[in-house]
Amino acid sequence: MGMQSLGRHLLGELHGCDRELLNRPEHVREAMLAAVARSGATPIQDFVHMFSPHGVTGIIVIAESHFAIHTWPEYGFAAVDLFTCGDTVDPWRAFEHVASALRAETHSVVEIRRGLLPSRDGQRLPHKPGA
Amino acid sequence: MGMQSLGRHLLGELHGCDRELLNRPEHVREAMLAAVARSGATPIQDFVHMFSPHGVTGIIVIAESHFAIHTWPEYGFAAVDLFTCGDTVDPWRAFEHVASALRAETHSVVEIRRGLLPSRDGQRLPHKPGA
């Protein structure tokens, strides 16, 4: 018996971003959709919300879990979540794209394994929920 | 100067859940919406997706960030993310509700502070993006 995880979850913190870009819902949406494409994930639905007077929330539901972003233009900050399952999707490529698209000066990111389950050696867990 | 965080993010892992409930989109949606209400958050939009042959993804966009769930009925497992900002919302009350609604036998949960920023003593960060 070994351990395998169902998913990988990157929690990214972007500092020193372009404040104007952080406040443009369409830019944030396009950055996230491009990140989905870079990662190899399959988009199912996307949603973006503009707060008053500033701040954007963007969510992309993907077949392999979800991507989410919340921006605070007043601090030049964005919190990014990239949760994927399966071996065919690379959330790190998505993270690089988002950090670049928002012109982050500095960032930190941690990867957390989600859904740790015991598994027999050689038995692979499915790539996506229900796959 | 001290440090304050913009948000709190609970990453919950629910094991030993009721497999039939995990595979009912409407039950998952209702559990998440009730969790939003328990936490004191304000729902903006919700989305649920049923995978074939099984597995559910549920996302609730809230004014204070987002709640997300992905279920793997075949393992009795669900991954829950409860990301909130502000002092008026309690993501732990939401977590307790979801764990109960899915009949989780065991769970683990970690709380991560998102958006750590230096702040002057006595100066509070805003409750929500743009607030």
Image: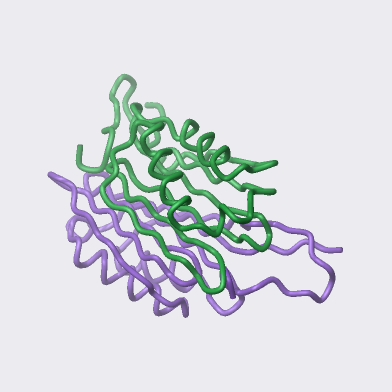
Chain colours: A green, B purple
Q: Residue at x 32, y 50 (%)?
A: A61
Residue B59 at what x, y percent from top left?
34, 60
Q: Is residue A116 depicted above or below A23 in this figure? A: above
| Horizontal side, residue A81 vs residue A61: left or right | right
Q: Nearer the viewer, residue B14 or A84?
A: A84
Picture quadrant where residue A48 is located: bottom left
| Horizontal side, residue A45 vs residue B95: left or right | left
Residue A58 at what x, y percent from top left?
43, 56
Q: How many marks?
A: 0
| Horizontal side, residue A9 vs residue A6: left or right | right
Residue located farthest toward the left when viewing the structure as drawn = B53
Residue A23 at what x, y percent from top left?
55, 59
| Quadrant of image for the C terminus of chain B | bottom right
Q: Residue at x 39, y 43 (%)?
A: A115
| Horizontal side, residue B121 vs residue A69: left or right | right
Q: Nearer the viewer, residue A68 or A71?
A: A71
Residue A77 at what x, y percent from top left?
64, 54
Q: Nearer the viewer, residue B16 or A99?
A: A99
Q: Residue at x 54, y 38 (%)?
A: A111
| Quadrant of image for the N terminus of chain B | bottom right
Residue located farthest toward the right when viewing the structure as drawn = B1
Q: Is residue A33 depicted above or below B38 in this figure? A: above
Q: Residue at x 57, y 79 (%)?
A: B88
